[in-house]
Amino acid sequence: MRNWSVTFLNAFRIALDTLWLHKLRTVLALFGIIIGIAAVVLVGATLGVVRESVMRSTAGTFGTDNFLISQVGSVGNLSRKALADKLRKNPEIYRREAETLAARIEPYARTAPVLQNFSDVKAGKNTFLTAQVTGSSPEIRTIRNIELSSGRFYAETENQRSKGVAVIGQALVDELFAEVDPLGKQVRIKGRPFVVIGVEEKQGSSFGSSLDRNVYIPMGAYEKIWGSRNSVDFYVQPRDPGRFDEIRETARFHLRNLRRLRPNAPDNFDIMMPEANRDFLAQIVDMVGIAIIPITSVALIVAGIVVMNMMLVSVTERTREIGIRKSLGARNRDILIQILLESTILTVLGGAAGLLISYMAAFGLDNAFDSKVSIQAGYVLAALAVAATIGIGAGIFPALLAARMPPVEALGSET
C-alpha cells in the first residue's frame, strides 16, 4: 500500500512548482480571491461597528431602564396622514401637566421633562452651527447617563431660578474654545448669555452624525428663548428596574386620570421604549447586511470562476505531461490530488492575503467610524474556510478531467 504522506507531499511540491512557474497567471487569479475575501470580511466587521453605534446612540438618546411619554412617539417614519391624525388626537403635554404627573409617581421613579431645539451657539467670534439644545431638569443627567469629562451639571436651585448655565458637548469645545479651558467661559444661544459649567464626555458619532453637539440648559432658561407653550417629552426611570412594567402602567394610569379619559377610551399620548427604537435600528442594519453581504459575495463567485478557468487552461497545457506521468505509474487519484492542491493553495493564499488587507483597512476605518473596527476570529475562520471551499470547488472539474484522461491520448497531444 502506497504511503499517503509521500503521495501528498509530492503532489504539494509539484503544485507549488507549477504555480511558481506561471507567476503572472497566479497573481492575477489571486487578486480576485483577495478582493472577494477582503470585501466580505470588512463588510461583516463594519456591520458589527454599526450595531454597536446603534446601541450607543439609543443609550445616549434614551439612557437605560426608562421610557418616554410624548405627544407623538413612533419607531420609524410615520406617514403624513398618520402624523396628522396623531397630532389631532393627542393633546400637547405641557410642563405643568408633566410636573403634576412627576409629583404623583415621584416615590417610584425619577422624571425629567425635556424640550429640544436646534440653534447656532456663539463664543466670541466663533460659531458652532446647529447644536442640539436640550432644556430639562437636573434628573436628565441620571436618566440619560450623561457623563462629564470636566465641570459639573446644573443643580436644582439653578434649574428653579432659570440660571443661564450650560453643559456642552466636546464638539462645541473643539470648535468654540480650541485649546482654551471652556469652564467659566460664556456662550450665546439666540443672543442670550450662558456660562459653561460642564463638558460632556466625548461620545463619538453614530451613522456619520456627531453625538457631541449637545447643549444642556435649565428648563426655565430654555423657555426664555423658545417660550413656554411647547409640548414636552417626559422621561421616566423607575427607581427599581425590576418594577419597570408596573411603573410604566402606573404612569400611564395617572396621565389618563389627569386627562379624564374613560376606561374604554384609547390613550391620547404615546409611550416609547428604548428597546423599540434600538430594535428598529438594529433591524435596519440587519436588512442592510442581508442585502450587502450577498452582493459582496459575488466577488468570490467570480474569483472561483477565474480559478476554474485558470486550472482548465493549466490542464490543457499539461496534457502531455499528465500522459507521461500516467505511463510512469501515476494513478488517477495522484493527478486528482495534484490539481486540487493547486487550486486550494491558490485560494487559501488569496484568502490569507485578503485577511491581511482587511486588518490594514480596519485601521483606516477606525477614524472614520470613531470606533474600533475589530475583525472577529469567526470572520477569519469563515474566510479561510470559504477560500478553501472555493479552491476545491473550482478545481474539482479540471482535476477530474485531468485524472480521467487516457494516457495514450494524452501522450499523443501536441499541446
Image (spheres, helix red, strand yellow):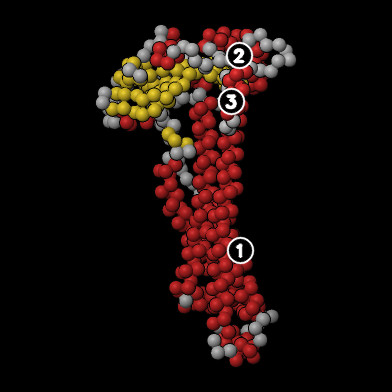
For the residues labelled 3 and 2, the Cα–Cα distance comes to 32 Å
Q: Nearer the viewer, mark 3 or mark 2?
A: 3
Q: Which mark is residue 11?
A: none
Estimate the spatial distance between the alpha carbons at disc 2 and disc 1, rounded to whole Å.
59 Å
Q: Image quarter for residue 173? A: top left
Residue corresponding to mark 3: 83
- Tell me which label, 3 or 2, sits earlier in the chain: 3
Q: In the figure, residue 218 lies in which quadrant?
A: top left
Give the secondary structure at mark 1: helix
Q: Where's the N terminus, which quadrant?
A: bottom right
Position above or below: 388 against 9 = above
Sequence-wise first label, 1 or 3:
3
Residue at the disc numbered 2: 108
Disc 2 secondary structure class? loop
Dot 2 or dot 1, earlier in sequence? 2
> Left or right: 385 with respect to 226?
right
Badge 3 amino acid: Leu
Find residue 128 and report its horizontal and vertical position in percent.
34, 28
At mark 3, the secondary structure is helix
- Which kind of residue does numbered mark 1 sit on? Thr
Residue toward you, 190 or 24: 190
Residue hosting label 1? 389
The residue positioned 55% from the left and 77% from the top of the image is 313
Marks 1 and 3 sit apart, C-alpha to C-alpha, by: 52 Å
Give the class, few, some or many, for how many residues have Cα within 10 Å of label 3's Cα (few <14, many ≥20): some
For the residues bearing labels 2 and 1, Cβ distance under 8 angstroms: no
Residue 84 visible in the displayed image: yes
Q: Quadrant of the C terminus?
A: bottom right
